[in-house]
Every structure is written in structure tokens, then in C-alpha cells.
Amino acid sequence: MKLLVSVKRVLDANVSIRLKPDLSGVDQSNVKMAINPFDEIAVEEAIRLKESGIAEEIIAVSIGEKKCQETLRTALAMGADRAIHIETDSQLQPLEIAKILKVITLQEKPEIIIMGKQSIDSDNNQTGQMLAALLGWSQGTYASKIDIQQKQVLVTREVDDGLETLSLNLPAVITTDLRLNEPRYVKLPNIMKAKKKPLSTLTAESLGINLTTGIEILKIEEPAKRSAGIIVNDVQELVSKLKNEARDIL
Amino acid sequence: MTEPQLPSHSSVVVIGGGIMGCSTLYHLAKEGVKDAILLERNKLTSGTTWHSAAQVRALRSSQNLTDLIRYSVSLYKSLEEETGQLTGWINKGSLSIATNQERLTFIKRQESLAKLFGVKAESISVGEARERWPLMNTEDVIGAVWSPDDGRVGPSDLCAALVKGAKSRGAKIFEDTGVTAILTKDGKIYGLETTRGDIKCDAIALCTGLWSQNNAKLAQVEAPVWACEHFYLLTEPVDAIQGNLPTLSDHDNHLYCRDESGGLLVGCFEPFGKAIDPDRIGENFEFQLLPEDWDHFEPMMMNALHRLPCLEDAGVKMLLNGPESFTSDGSFMLGESAETKGLFLGCGMNSVGVATGGGAGMALAHCIIHGHTPMDLHEVDPKRFPDCFNSAENLAKRVPEVLGEHYAITHPGKQYSTARNLRLTPLHNKWVENKAHFGQFYGWERPLYFNCEKEPTLTFEKPEWFEQVGREVKQANEQAAIFDQSTFGKILVQGTDAEKFLNRICANNMSKSVGSVIYTAMLNELGGFESDLTSLRLADESYRLYVGTTAVKRDMSWLRRHIQTGERVTLIDETEHYAVIGLMGPESSTIADKIGATELNQVGYFRHCESQIAGADVRAVRMSYVGEAGWEITCRAQDAERVYDEISAAGALPSGVLAQSSMRIEKGFLAYGHDLDTDINPLQAGLGFAVNWDKQFIGRDALLKMKETAVSSRMVTIILEDTQAIPLGNEPIYLNGEIVGKTTSAAFGYRIGKPVALAYINTSISDNLEGIQLEIDIARTLYKGTVLLKPAFDPASQRMRVKLQTQGKNYNEITG
């Protein structure tokens, strides 16, 4: 079985974010980046499937600027077999990403695509779903457990009511949630081996698809600062404030 | 942590909340500065301190730097009790290993040093090293030194404890408060502007680490600090690690290793680092790291895998890349700036911030309160940097190499290869023609020796240049040699009050007549050497001071700051206007005749005269740093080459700095920074003859008190028996198994045929030191030597003072 894992290069979760002075976006210059944590979980799951003999080949894909290759190297160090970098400097939206991944999917013919449920920078939670729709494949999102059977995959999903297990026909798109697994720490020999694994680059423009997005970002602003709390003297005052002032804020 | 309102005035404002700022604030408060405050642009420790590996290894290159770290250790221990805040101090010692002979010699030299400084260190067998660090692969290890008192600390916890201790004594801290302007008037601090209001203050301690160069400029101060990436690897827990381990210093492989949270921390100072563009670490760089760079780290990774085979199976949590600040020479900055009074610098820690921080903060606070550091710290004086290293270009070129040198063996003759040829003396081309091997001093290229065919391999054994330097000494001793002394600082002191001013600042009598040459100390209030210099009285109101190559900025600052209001004195730095050419040797008077500079043969010893050489005006001083007959000839820089050509055509040949150094050591002439510093006074240095007791000068009272009691240690010459011994300076001296002194400068004395060392030894060992047999510990081998109270070569200085013959007439020498 062949697996395709898509990984995104995002701001490191520990970085404190600032906006660009012109408020056109988050300042990503000179900031530490990392593999999207949910994608890292996806890679880990793929490796485990390979280690248990179910998958034979894992291909990691990333779309973005040249530095995405670092993210792909992380995936290769974890155990992916080869990587494909779709190079572009444009800021792409989920639909465009899904279109690109569709082209790669048709090229590489994996049976399962695994990716994070969302990226921690844009939090869209759309790409996996859109990709499944474009391909006409089954989808199992927010996976907290994946169980591959003969021609199907059982995906246990974390939903508001609890856990829901779906049976999906292959091929399928699965998006990962936090509790699916705990990604391994890579070992030094694997980091070295990763350098020798194949990494090919294509430009997004060369794929022959329309990458113009229909979405325009109007503005980005910081959340309103929390104002200081007020200490009230007694219950009466508390009730009065709740009745008369808190309502406006809510 | 944030107090509501900024005060309108504070005696001392500390800017920067890393280890240096926190420690300085703590010590200011402890020493009674009740209104000290600290301003931190973001949050405490958010620059470099928070990600420091926080190793604390005591042994440094000098007693005082070592003492700063030992002070840190005892402070970090006691802070827990004092404040109730743990500092995370773990004392598991450190292990230095050697995988080649040169490193082994080096760590043994360090072991000797440790004994000199009172730091515990012992050579141990490879087997014992393996026992102390079982995970280490020892197949290529040939020796090790064990230092039990070293350890490490938690940097954030430490700062929390320091801050707690400071606040309990009334100090206040303001986070999220950036400084936007520093206010000065007449070259002195009087306040600053912040994002939360203005503050008047009398002094500022600038402890802003990576950002110090830009911040210093707010006060018109140059602080040449530049950031480099620093890497260390963190792994998940390793089964074999139980509890804490000592630090393993595998410096041949550029690594330091220890445990961290049950796993391994492996850091490196790779041979050539990565400088960081300041744009990448702007003011919003708070608790941030830089990207992992596995490609850059790979050679270090291979070294780490070799040394710690268990790393192969350890999961890597991260390759941490955090910026650290470096200076052009690998030592930090501590003290008052040259440019602005009241602006004190405590930054550029070269990755020893947490280790040194306790002691450095103490020293900086002391300097701010008392006007001087508690002990000599000239090695970290901010006034030691030449201006050429203020340039971003030069700094950025140099610091990657400085990082790489962090663990390098400090061989004799070691030179940086980056940022060279910044300052060329007027005779540089001549030296190149003579195949000079250059060294960089204060930015200047100086010829170390000549006829160098290839880059020498450095060693603690007999150096490759040994014979060549011998030939250059012989040239000066038997014929005539040319020395390039153009790098000397030249300061013109002029004005109606010049004589009065200099008499107050200098220990010797500056009232001697025009034409006199005066060698004098400039002392501080405690009677210690701030500088030693030679002064030429050019006219009643005009003196030219010749100061050491590296002393210009420091001495100019000292002179300037001691001019009293209304005193009519001007100072001009003329260093680059003039070349200084030394013509020394028994043939020099013949040469002076040949070239028609007859005045040279007429001027008396320690006097100066004007003359002409090759049509150029020159001023010659009858004196010699190398102890041979001759002159130091000053001419305009643009005339240097033709003066040289004339002298050279008459038969003089060039000799370099190493020859000069060997010769001056044979003559017992002392050098600032080696034999003299602010802790040494003229009495113990044997320079009491250059003190004029009949007048009031800075340091006189302290010296008089010292004169009453015998000095506890004094300068002597030691001649070693074994001609193969290679003393280098900074070695302990033993008598009957006890350390009784240390060497300060040393060289092979070609004129006496034996190695010579200058040393300070305890006077208590005997009433008569002359002829006593002592032993010098060189890399843990003892070499016998004999003490002399007079110089090793020509003690009566007959050669320097010889009558000069010219055209059949004799002229008596006149001692100035």
C-alpha cells in the first residue's frame, strides 16, 4: 500500500506572534518554523503503518517556498521514503492546495492520503475535506484511531458527542487529530539518512491548474486586549453589574 | 513583576534583564544603592539567558576572571538560602579530555593554572575518566583533567532568585519598558527616555546582550558586540543516564555534553560559526529561537556520535539554535565606556554569561559605585577595542571565528585569520617584501618574524620560528636591526597647564627640561598601574606621550577624565600621523654617521633630538626597549619608507616583534597587560625609581603607605637551567612543593642562551631572593630556575648607555 502524507511548514507553536506593521499578515520573517503538529501526527501514523507491514511506501508532500524542504526532511527523517516539494511563493488557500494535491495524487496513485486536520496558523480545517471531494474519495476526519482492514479502513473520529467509528472504502483521505498518536523523536542516524532520500521539486505553476483564489483577506488584527477585572464589594454589587453592565459586553 | 509607576529619578538604571542585568541590579541593591531600577524591553531572560546551557566552569585564563566565576558559584549556592528561590545549582564537576598531544599539553597547562588560582583540578587516567562518564567512547582519549567544583545552574531560576534578592532590598524592575533615548550632556549621562516616561539618573549599566551595539550608540558609545548562532542538541531520556552527570568537555571535537532531564544535552562551538544579521533579531525577538540547521551541525553531530555512541539510539527532541553575543577577541566587556561618563557596559559575554554573571554583576556594581572594578579586569575593559572593530563588516567577519576559538588550544603565536589587514603600519610593504609573518595587535598588522615561507604549525614544543627569531636577535646584538614600533600610541598633551596636569597624573617628575625623555607610570588612587608610558618634552607646554600599542583608547580616556575644570590642557591622538622606527645594535652609531644623522650620535641617553634622514625630519630618542645601543626614531608616516630605505641601505636589517619580546624580557623591561596591571604597584614591579616622591600625584598616598611595609610580592627574573624548557608566562612557581609565585612573561633568551621568565614571587620566602633556586611548573613538569634581582642580560645596561663614537670625537653620555 502506498501512502501520501501532506505536511505544512508553519510557525513553531512556541513562537509569540506579531503582526506585520502594515497589518497585512503575521510577521514570519526570522521566526522559527516547524512542521504543523497535526501533520507530524500524520507522518507518525504513516510510519507506524509501514512498520507494521501494511504500507510499503510513504511519500511526503509539501507546498510552499524553498524552505519547505526542511519540513520534508523532517518527514524523511521520521521514516518517509521520498518527498515532493511543490514550490511556490504565493499564499495559497485550502481549495488551491487541495487542487495541487489532487494532481499529485493522480500522479502517485496512493491508496490513502493522511494529513493533519488543520494547520495551526490558518486553522481552516478544509483541505482534507476538499481534497476528498475533488477526488471523489471517502474521507475520515479528526481521526483518533486508524485501523486498516482488507479493502476498508476503520476510522474512529473524535466528535462532540464522543467517538464515532466509520468504515471507509479505499481509497480514502484521513485527517488526524491530536490523540491519534504521539510522534516519535527522530534519531541522528535517520537525520543523516534523510539527506540521501529522494526529494523532487516541481513548481506549482507547472502543474497546469488554476491557482487563483476566490478569497481575499480584508484585514488581520490582534485580539482585543483583556481589560482589567474589577473587584466588587458585595453580592448585591455583583448582581447589579451582571444585570446592567455585563450584558453589553456579552 | 511590574511596578506601576516609573520613578522620575534613580541613581543607577540597569538596562536589560538577562543574567548580567539581574546580577548587576542585585549587587547594586546589596551594596546599598536603594533606588536602583532595571528596565527590560520585553521580559526578563527573554534574549539569550533563558536558553543558555548555563555551564559553570571556573578555570579561565587569569586569576581574576577565574575568581569571578568562583564568586558566582558561591553566590548561586547561597542565593537559595537567602531568597528561598532555587537556582538549580547542580555540582557534578567537569571532565576535560584530550585526544592529541597538543591538547594534552594544553589541559595540563590548565591544570597547572588551576593550582595557581586555587581551583581544584587533577589529571586522571583514561580509565578513571571512563568511570566518571561511562557513556563516553574513550578509544582515542589519551588523557583527562577532572575539576570537581564545576557545575551548572538553571538560568531562569537564577535570575528569579537574583531579582527576588534585589527587590527585597528596594530595587524595582520594569518589564515591557523600552529605552528610546539616552540623555547626555558634556559627555556624561544624566537621564533616559522610555516608552513609559523619562528618568533622570547618574549612571546606566547597559546589559542588553545581543542588542548592546545599537543601544550603546544611543549614548554615543561604541560596543562591538555581534551575535552568532549557537547550537545544542536535546534528546529524550536515555536509560543509561541515572541522576546528573559531570560536564564532559571534548574540546578537540568542539563539544560539551551533559545530562538534561534524563536525556543528553550536546552543544558545540564549531570551528566556524554563523554570524546573525541584526535584522533577524529585532526588538520583538522575545523567547525566540532560530531555525535548526542540520547541515551546519552535521560535522558536530558526527563528532557527537563518535564520542557518545548511545546517541545513535536516542530520539532527538530538538536542535536548539539560540543567538549568543561575541566580541572581536572572545572576552566580554565590563566597565565604563571610553566615550561617555556614567555609561557602563556589561555585555558581550561570549557564552560565559551565566557562569561569569554572578561575579561580573558584582564587579560591575562595584565599578559603578566606586569608580573602579574590585580587582584588575583589564582583559575585559571595554576600552581595549580598536575602532576598526566597531564596523559591522569587520565584526561580522570575525565573530564566527571567535566562536570557533572558544574551545581552541591557546597556542603561543595564535592569530585570528579573519578581519585582518585592517590597519597597516607605514612600513607594511617593507615587511611584506621581507616575508614577514604578521600578527594583529589592536587592529594593526605587526611583523612577528621574517623570512616566513609558509604558515607555521603552532605547538607548545619548540616553535618553527625559533631559529629565525634567534637570527633577528643576533642582528640587533651584533650589528644593527630595524624594529617597527609605529603601533605605539602617540598622544600630544599641550597647554599652559600641561606640565602641572602631567605632574598630577604621572608618578615621575614631568618638570624635566625640554629635550628630556621620562619613563613614568600613570597610577590610580590605589597606587596600581593604569598605564606606563614614555614622555618626550617637546617644548615648555608640549609633551608627546608614547603609550603601548593597545593602550591608546584607555589612556586617552584616563587623561581626558582627569583634566580639571578650567585647566588649560588639550589632548590629540597622533598615533596614525607618525611612524616609529627602532634602530638598535652596536653598528647603529656607524649607520647614523653614514646617513648623515649626526645629531643622533650626539644626543645623550634618555634624551631626544631632531635630525634629518633621507631629507625627512625625524626626532630620535636615545633609548632601547631591547637593551642595545640605538634610538627610537619618529618621523611622519609618509616619510617612513624613505627613512627605512636609507637605514636599510646603510646595513640595518629588520627584526620582528618576537625578537623584540625575547630581548625585552632578557632586559627585565615590563609590559602592560603581562607584567603590569591595575593590581600591581611600582614598588612590587621594581619601578620605584620612576616615582617622584616630592610632589602630589594620583596614587602617592597609597604608595607611601605601601612603602612603609615591605611588599608581599615582587618582580624578579628567573633563568631556567634546561635550555629545552619553553616557559610561556602564567605558570606557577614552586619552592619545596608550595606555590610561591607565578611567571608573567617568558621567552628564550638568545643572548644568554637560556630560557628567561619574568615573575612575581612572594618576598616572604627569603630575606635575600638573589640566587634562590625555584621550580617553574610548565604543563605539570617542574623546571629548575635561579632567581635574579637584576635583568638576565647586561644588568648594568652598558650596551644601551655606551658612549657613541662619531668622526673620531667622543661624546659623553648624559643620563637624563
Image (tube, helix red, strand yellow):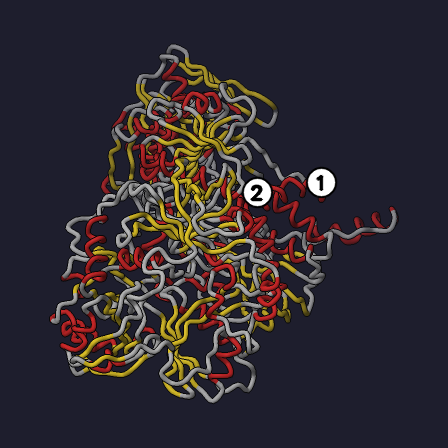
**Residue B14: percent from left, percent from top:** 60, 60
Tell me if mark 2 has few (under 14), some (14-19) or many (20+) residues whose alpha carbon lies within 10 angstroms of its own.
many
Q: Secondary structure at mark 1?
A: helix
Quickly name the residue at label 1.
B81
Q: Quadrant of residue A162?
A: top right
Please tell me which residue is depicted at 47% across the width and 54% down the height of the picture: B332
Output the chain of dot 1.
B
Q: Secondary structure at mark 2?
A: helix
Quickly name the residue at label 2.
B155
Q: How many marks?
A: 2
- Residue type at mark 1 is Glu
**Residue A216: percent from left, percent from top:** 42, 51
**Residue B574: percent from left, percent from top:** 34, 77
Separation of residues labelled 2 and 1 (CA atoms):
17 Å
Q: Earlier in the sequence, mark 2 or mark 1?
A: 1
Output the chain of dot 2.
B
Q: Please identify the residue farthest to the top as the structure is shown.
A: A150
Give the vertical position of B696 relative to B523 (above or below): below
- Residue type at mark 2 is Pro
Q: Nearer the viewer, residue A191 or B754?
A: B754
Q: Nearer the viewer, mark 2 or mark 1?
A: 1
User: Do the dots labelled 2 and 1 sit on one chain?
Assistant: yes
